[in-house]
Image (cartoon, rainbow, N blue to C red):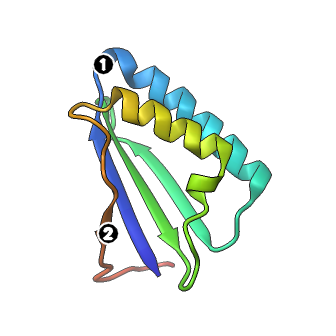
Amino acid sequence: MTTLMLRYHVADDDVQTVVRAVEAAFAGLRDERPEGLRFTYFRVAETAEFVGLVELADGRDNPLPALEATRALKAVVDRVAAGGPPTPQPLHVLGAYGR
């Protein structure tokens, strides 16, 4: 399994813009239902920091760049993220419970 994390901050004025873009992206994902993907998005409580986690089944390519709804989310994030577009970082799972 491949796990990627995307972490970034935005200006306070852009928080709701990102929240709406995330909601739209997940609506699109519910419609498309790509296989081999787990995607979770978080807002650090009461802050302007966001974290996205992408988990891809072994041998699966990331379907997110090919989906219109998630491309739209990326465009918003690239535009409003402090310091420029964030880069997904690979994570190595050291332990997990309840998966």
Relative to 56, residue 12 above or below: above
Compare residues 85 and 9 and report the one nearer the observer.
85
Q: Which residue has dot 2 on it?
A: 90
Q: Amino acid at mark 2?
A: Pro
Amino acid type of the residue tagged 1 in the rendering = Asp
Question: Residue at the location (20% across, 34% down)?
Answer: 83
Residue 29, position as x, y percentages in the image: 69, 51
Left or right of 32? Residue 48 is: left
Is 9 positioned to the left or the right of 24 in the image? left
Query: Going 28% across and 30% down the picture, which residue do you hit?
Result: 47
**Disc with the residue nearer the chain's start (1 vs 2):** 1
Report how far apart the C-alphas of labels 1 and 2 lie in the structure: 27 Å
Q: Nearer the viewer, residue 42 or 11?
A: 11
| Above or below, comparing residue 55 to residue 16 in the picture | below
Of the pair 81 and 12, the residue shown nearer to us: 81
Mark 1 element type: helix
Q: Quadrant of residue 63?
A: bottom right
- The relative height of residue 65 versus residue 9 in the rendered view (above or below) is below
**Looking at this rendering, what residue extends furthest in the left direction?**
83
Q: Residue furthest right?
A: 31
Along the horizontal axis of the image, is 99 left or right of 15?
right
The residue that appears at 53% across and 59% down in the rendered structure is 39
From the top left corner, tell me how far across and down residue 51 is, in percent.
36, 48
Where is residue 76? Give x, y as percent. 46, 30
Horizontal side, residue 80 vs residue 60: left or right: left
Residue at position x 30%, y 28% from top?
Answer: 10
Q: Which mark is residue 12?
A: 1
Between disc 1 and disc 2, the foreground one is: 2
